[in-house]
Image: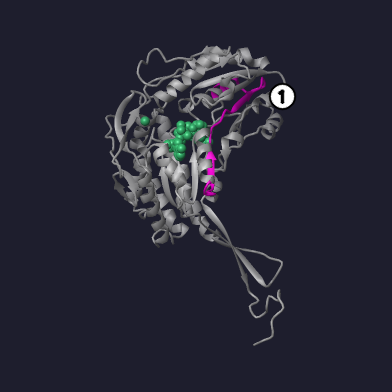
Amino acid sequence: MAIPNIRIPSRQLFIDGEWREPVKKNRLPAINPATEEIFGDIPAATAEDVDIAVKAARRALGRDDWGSTTGAQRAKYLRAIAAKVLERRPELATLETIDNGKPWFEAASDIDDVVACFEYYADLAEALDSKKKTEVKLHLDSFKTHVFREPLGVVGLITPWNYPLLMTTWKVAPALAAGCAAILKPSELASITSLELGEICREVGLPPGALNILTGLGHEAGSPLVSHPDVDKIAFTGSGPTGVKIMTAAAQLVKPVTLELGGKSPIVVFDDIHDLDIAVEWTLFGCFWTNGQICSATSRLILQETIAPQFLDRLLEWTKNIKISDPLEEDCKLGPLISRGQYEKVLKFISTAKNEGATILYGGDRPQHLNKGYYIQPTVITDVDTSMEIWKEEVFGPVLCVKTFKTEEEAIALANDTKYGLGAAILSKDLERCERFTKAFQSGIVWINCSQPCFWQPPWGGKKRSGFGRELGEWSLENYLNIKQVTQYVSTDEPWAFYKSPSKL
Ligand SMILES: NC(=O)c1ccc[n+]([C@@H]2O[C@H](COP(=O)([O-])OP(=O)(O)OC[C@H]3O[C@@H](n4cnc5c(N)ncnc54)[C@H](O)[C@@H]3O)[C@@H](O)[C@H]2O)c1
Ligand SMILES: NCCCC=O
Ligand code: NA
């Protein structure tokens, strides 16, 4: 359970294995979205701090205690980090809830995923040792070719606020497993637990410079990290517009990026579902979990006409039953949005939907029993037209819009009617139909008879405007490896004989 009256740590930047005050000594407030109160603060890094961190990372790569480690040695650090995170689970979950606003039991579940992720990448780090150098068979005996998988170098990791420590872990764990030296820039809206990861790394003795953590504003700390000439790669998770800025800046240096961006994912529900309540609950979870702030939220419900009235009636009964409260309260199932900015943005989406002719079937406003905090009711919007903003744009709040369909062809067209391509879900008893939809969905993730379950072993990512690259699983390790080909001429007593040899001297 949540820790009452928890002590809020006050940290500096984590650079070269120690806590350092930002060069400009600036700090930013840490706000609790459930109370709108400042509960602490975080250091605000600027370009000067970025440069110091990049130099520390580069030094780490040049030292034996990190740059020459085996995967097995790095695995020890990752497992030690996992153990420390587990030890601090109640505290980290409570800090996450206070900083982000997600219900405590969701934050605790995130922390469990963090532990599992570090342990998983420890295993992959170990396995890397036997894959570091592999021979490639050639058609010529006079050459031998090997492929080396080596750390990519100094990597910049930029993360969002909706799963603060988990999104940090999705990047830090594979980057360290691969042997890179990382500079993490978490979101200024929820950095507290990422800074605690720095303390955990210090306690387990992670070599200085292997992981550096720079909190601060995107344009002050994130942007200089992207543009730094001695950073070899950027792994970014965040909004589309920021992704475009990052890709543009990285392009100037031909710097590789992976972009995990936004989404407007569909959930297609047929009238042959196994069970109405089960289908309704997945539909709710697919959009209202994490206070509705899920990149892969199935926020477009595409409902077969024949079941629509019955389904919507039941959906409203379930929606009205959601406990909206302080996220530290037991059984809270919907907490506040991350910030006043996000709160106002979501309310604007709802009012625009109304003005464009949609119907707010349920919700659409602040819950009457909560006059503080960035709370918005779980909202269901019908009479939606595909030309409307609410159909096209990512809301990133607990807002589900609904359209109906008659035929499969119509459902597929509606599902793919989005510039995004992250997730897609289909609820139907007919598994052949589910297979047809799996093929037809233009996305990187498909859920069948569920929505949102996310595991660390399979790949995560999208296509179209949801970005590119894959995180999690073995796919994420590839993001942080340089593939080097080494070809050796082994017939050293035979001339290459491409040119006519001049007479011997
Ligand atoms: N695809 C995924 O796996 C995934 C996961 C979580 C969130 N998201 C997306 O993230 C968005 C919400 O997160 P957010 O509000 O934190 O996104 P955001 O783009 O506002 O910020 C993300 C991160 O980028 C930093 N940043 C901002 N401007 C920058 C710049 N010019 N240069 C470098 N860094 C900069 C921010 O400080 C933050 O750390 C949503 O669109 C959501 O869909 C995607
Ligand atoms: N379940 C993790 C989803 C990440 C996107 O917000
Ligand atoms: Na916060």
Residue 115 vs 384, above or below: the answer is below
Q: Over which residues does the magenta segment extend?
A: 252-281
Q: Residue at x 57, y 35 (%)?
A: 466
Neighbor class of circle 1 (other Cα within 10 Å; few <14, some 14-19, many 20+) is some
Tell me if residue 504 comes above or below residue 125 in the rendering: below
Location of the N terminus (image quadrant):
top left
Figure quadrant of the C terminus: bottom right
Which residue is located at x 54 percent, y 32 percent? 262
Residue nearer the viewer, 353 or 113: 353
- Depth check: give the residue in front, 398 or 116: 398
Which residue was labeled with disc 1?
A: 408
The reply to whether residue 216 is visible in this rendering is: yes
Residue at (54, 26) in percent of width and height: 394
The amino acid marked with disc number 1 is Glu
Is residue 454 in view? Answer: no
Q: How is the image coloured?
A: one colour
